[in-house]
Image (cartoon, rainbow, N blue to C red):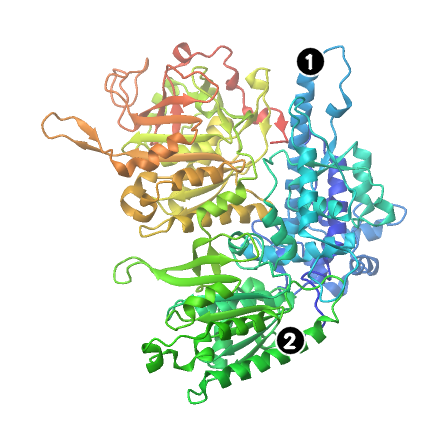
């Protein structure tokens, strides 16, 4: 085994300082903000100044996700790169991991402040975006609470507002922000490292550890039964009362130590929020910069814990137990399959069997598990009878993503954590002698692990070591392949196999046994091990279908687990990754509420139509004419509808009506904060649209070209300059083929998660061209529940969802009528409609008899040209269905109507420039 120093969890060298910096930044931001005031105007430098020390701490690309990220700027400014030129006092502040001053005080003079200004990033960084995002969530909750209080006050004028209904200041736990910050956005499996670090931090701060984890007696422990009781007390307090409909708030501490620990752990996961009586006590807590629960400064901290407004129920007890006791698996999808981690037995041993035929990836999976656990300072002993040592060392490098190798706590060399012993059994020695030598080696190893574990601190590692026996069939019975005795039906004695497994379990380590499915002991092995995994291929390798690696989980003895078939991959730059079944992903999301459309945030694009006179002029122009309409050429079409943010829109139509462009136009339209006042006074929401497009039709360049034209058209409609509230777009373009539903679902889910971990979430999703699924994506077509499952996932977030579909028609040779193609392949369409579509829009060619009161491009009779389409609103949530239609110009990417005399324009208020309206800072 390699000789590592006594184990410390990942990020142990910076964790407490990052938590303190986060608390101080939260306090500074909360002091600036109010429920009626958003975070957009708060300078990012005032957050980044608390974290500039990280840029000095890490260089050369180490822990890059803490310094850089996505579209954000780096914490490391150009002046920070020149360390030798730093102001001596500024350098001392950074060395002490303090906050750089930006305003002169008695302690910091002008010259020091001037030197520090260049050391602080003044643009958005990943950490400033995460903290602002967390604050914005609480501000939205407070604003909703104020609206509720105002409504009740209006209904009960003259009476005093009850104390329990008065507004409070809400704060998201700094541990949740740090949890997100320590996770590499593109590598979801890295969340396991952050979980272990923060879990151990809570154990130490509360002075208790899970029972059974330590190798020696520990004074203060808690059991699974105590966790169950503490969880019950949380839910008893938070659930609504039967008669009053009210609920109690939780104190920070309970009667038992486990109460406080579990409540902070729930806050770490975003399930509970902090609730302060007033802003002063919130600021006192944040600026104190002390999180430890047993510290005298906060022993009487005056805050309570409240449920997240988005919470439906608490997680399952089994999942919480796995997360507190178990070994986190740093593999993408591993947290879903093993429901938070691998939980060991009370004897602290866990034996995993990996079955599979030749080439299914048994050795690679076992080797990768050791590689991904190496940053937890868990060594791996790899015993093999089939592979050469040098070949395994080369293979392991390709199983780990480059992002992991840049972590400061990842071992620099594979030989630092991996010991490979090649044992080739001699068939003449017999299985008894081979087993005896292996079991003797295991006894020696157990003694070495016992001696090493005795040097660990209060919080033990969740696993002492990983032991891999690669090719158990060769170790246990050398004649397994082609042996005459096996062919005659000789079987391995069950007692001998049971004894061997028990010796493995006594190692109190993670023991992985890989085995072929063609030896006599394979059938009995699953009864003896704790976790059983079966690897296989699926698909016809002789056709165009790509081979699909599958992981079948058939047994998990000590824990809640996702039993069933999942996908997994071991090739590519992302290394080993799992692709869990959709149902298990949704099961974990089910604790959160389905988000409803926000009727306070309105897109008025369908009510903002071009006048017929301007439309006629625009349609008659040639390419050389540069005339463009202005905001005054649009009128308020009161007969149409407003669209709400967070709504589910379905756009259907015949043929090529420009539905992709229309979907993009709706997605990138600015939003307004509606109220009872006149629409002209509605403030513009200063949140640029970030759009994800799942395209079954076109590549990314197609949508970017359309978006460029639409930005110009938006300036015509709203007077917004191109650079102001400029939308961004990311396209997942799917090529025709045998794409698995779970792979597409997880690809979308992980892209949305990555954006949230950057502090830059998407606010609109476009599913473009689902009719193409019927022909070019047979696997998705066969999975009838894919669409409702996908929509259920999307609606767990504050996302506007827009789906486009083209109805296919064929002409009839005799009666010259067109008939719609509608068979079982249109099932996704029906599911889309079932999923509570909030707005249904039909885009069809205009009727030949449909005329406007002014001439259009082709004739003087008022008939519409071939590039114009009728846009019909078939359903609209909480609004009457319009009787009049809006028209869509596919060529000019603009909406126009019949005119204010027909559509209605009472005050013509939208002729004023919306860009001059008041600004709404909250979403």
| Residue drawn where x is 56% and y is 65% of the image | 372
Residue 617's place in the image compared with 207, above or below, is above
Q: Secondary structure at mark 2?
A: helix
Q: Nearer the viewer, residue 476 or 681?
A: 476
Screen quadrant of the N terminus = bottom right
The residue under label 1 is: 154
Q: Residue 814: name its quadrant.
A: top left
In-image side of 460 versus 764 (left or right): right
- Residue 270 visible here: yes
Q: What crowding class fits label 1: few (fewer than 14 Cα within 10 Å), some (14-19), or many (20 or more)?
A: few
Q: Nearer the viewer, residue 630 or 376?
A: 376
In-image side of 702 versus 670 (left or right): left
Question: Mark number for residue 210?
Answer: none
- Disc 2/disc 1 C-alpha distance (Å): 72 Å
**Could you say where residue 909 lies in the image, as x and y percent from the top left?**
52, 16
**Could you say where residue 485 lies in the image, as x and y percent from the top left?**
35, 81
| Residue drawn where x is 83% and y is 53% of the image | 112
The residue under label 2 is: 446
| Residue drawn where x is 60% and y is 66% of the image | 349
- Residue 659 visible here: no
Q: Residue 403: name its quadrant.
A: bottom right
């Amino acid at each position: 085994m390699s000789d590592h120093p006594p184990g410390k969890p990942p990020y142990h060298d910076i964790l407490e300082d990052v938590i303190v910096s986060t608390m101080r930044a939260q306090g500074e931001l909360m002091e600036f903000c109010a429920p009626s005031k958003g975070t957009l105007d708060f300078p990012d430098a005032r957050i980044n100044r608390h974290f500039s020390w990280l840029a000095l701490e890490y260089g050369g690309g180490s822990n890059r996700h803490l310094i850089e990220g996505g579209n954000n700027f780096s914490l490391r400014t150009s002046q920070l790169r020149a360390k030798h030129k730093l102001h001596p006092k500024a350098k001392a502040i950074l060395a002490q991991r303090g906050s750089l001053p930006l305003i002169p005080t008695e302690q910091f003079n002008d010259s020091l402040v001037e030197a520090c200004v260049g050391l602080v990033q003044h643009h958005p960084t990943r950490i400033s975006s995460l903290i602002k995002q967390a604050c914005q969530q609480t501000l939205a909750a407070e604003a909703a609470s104020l609206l509720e209080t105002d409504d009740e006050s209006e209904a009960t004028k003259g009476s005093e507002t009850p104390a329990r209904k008065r507004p409070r200041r809400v704060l998201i736990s700094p541990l949740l922000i740090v949890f997100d910050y320590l996770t590499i956005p593109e590598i979801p499996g890295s969340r396991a490292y952050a979980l272990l670090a923060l879990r151990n931090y809570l154990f130490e701060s509360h002075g208790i550890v899970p029972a059974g984890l330590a190798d020696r007696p520990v004074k203060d422990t808690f059991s699974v039964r105590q966790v169950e009781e503490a969880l019950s007390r949380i839910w008893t307090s938070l659930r609504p009362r039967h008669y009053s409909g009210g609920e109690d708030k939780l104190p920070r501490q309970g009667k038992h130590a486990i109460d406080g620990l579990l409540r902070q752990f729930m806050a770490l996961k975003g399930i509970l929020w902090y609730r302060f009586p007033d802003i002063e006590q919130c600021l006192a807590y944040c600026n104190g910069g002390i999180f430890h629960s047993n510290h005298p400064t906060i022993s009487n901290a005056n805050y309570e814990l409240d449920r997240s407004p988005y919470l439906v129920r608490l997680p399952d007890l089994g999942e919480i137990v796995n997360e507190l006791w178990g070994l986190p698996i740093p593999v993408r999808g591993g947290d879903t399959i093993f429901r938070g981690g691998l939980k060991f037995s009370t004897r602290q041993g866990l034996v995993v069997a990996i079955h599979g035929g030749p080439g299914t990836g048994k050795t690679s999976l076992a080797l990768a598990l050791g590689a991904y656990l190496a940053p937890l300072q868990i060594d791996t002993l790899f015993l093999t009878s089939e592979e050469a040592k040098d070949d395994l060392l080369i293979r392991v490098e390709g199983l780990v993503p480059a992002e992991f190798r840049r972590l400061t706590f990842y071992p620099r060399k594979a030989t630092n954590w991996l010991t490979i012993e090649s044992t080739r059994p001699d068939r003449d020695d017999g299985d008894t002698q081979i087993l005896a030598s292996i079991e003797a080696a295991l006894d020696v190893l157990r003694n070495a692990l016992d001696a090493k574990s005795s040097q660990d601190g209060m919080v033990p590692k969740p696993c002492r070591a990983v032991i891999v026996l690669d090719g158990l069939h060769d170790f246990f019975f050398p004649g397994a392949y082609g042996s005459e005795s096996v062919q005659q039906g000789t079987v391995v004695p069950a007692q001998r196999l049971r004894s061997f497994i028990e010796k493995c379990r006594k190692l109190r380590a993670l023991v992985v046994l890989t085995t072929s499915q063609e030896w006599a002991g394979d059938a009995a092995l699953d009864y003896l091990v704790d976790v059983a995994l079966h690897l296989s291929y699926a698909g016809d390798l002789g056709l165009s279908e790509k081979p699909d690696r599958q992981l079948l989980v058939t047994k998990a003895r000590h824990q809640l687990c996702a039993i069933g078939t999942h996908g997994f991959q071991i090739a590519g730059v992302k290394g080993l990754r799992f692709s869990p079944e959709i149902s298990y992903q949704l099961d974990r999301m089910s604790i959160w509420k389905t988000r409803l459309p926000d009727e306070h945030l309105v897109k008025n694009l369908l009510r903002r139509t071009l006048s017929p006179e301007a439309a006629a002029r625009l349609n008659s122009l040639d390419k050389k004419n540069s005339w463009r309409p202005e905001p005054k050429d649009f009128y308020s079409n009161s007969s149409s509808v407003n669209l709400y943010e967070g709504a589910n829109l379905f756009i259907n139509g015949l043929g090529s009506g420009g539905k992709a462009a229309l979907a993009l136009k709706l997605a990138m339209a600015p939003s307004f904060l509606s109220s009872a006042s006149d629409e002209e006074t509605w403030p513009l929401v200063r949140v640029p649209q970030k759009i994800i497009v799942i395209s079954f039709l076109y590549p990314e360049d197609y949508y970017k070209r359309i978006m460029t034209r639409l930005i110009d058209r938006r300036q015509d409609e709203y007077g917004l300059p191109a650079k102001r509230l400029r939308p961004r777009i990311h396209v997942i373009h799917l090529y025709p083929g045998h794409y698995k539903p779970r792979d597409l679902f997880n690809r979308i889910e992980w892209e949305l998660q990555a954006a949230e971990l950057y502090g830059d979430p998407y606010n609109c999703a476009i599913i473009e061209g689902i009719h193409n699924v019927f022909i070019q994506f047979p696997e998705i077509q066969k999975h009838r529940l894919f669409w409702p499952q996908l929509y259920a996932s999307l609606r767990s977030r504050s996302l506007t969802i827009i789906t486009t579909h083209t109805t296919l028609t064929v002409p009839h040779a005799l009666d010259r009528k067109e008939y719609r193609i509608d068979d079982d392949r249109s099932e996704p369409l029906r599911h889309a409609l079932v999923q509570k579509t909030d707005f249904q829009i039909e885009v069809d060619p205009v009727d030949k008899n449909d005329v406007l009161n002014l001439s259009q491009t082709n004739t003087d009779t008022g008939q519409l040209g071939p590039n114009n389409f009728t846009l019909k609103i078939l359903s609209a949530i909480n609004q009457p269905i319009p009787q009049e239609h809006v028209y869509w110009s596919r060529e000019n990417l603009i909406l126009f109507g019949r005119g204010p005399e027909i559509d209605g324009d009472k005050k013509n208020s939208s002729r004023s420039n919306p860009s001059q309206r008041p600004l709404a800072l909250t979403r």
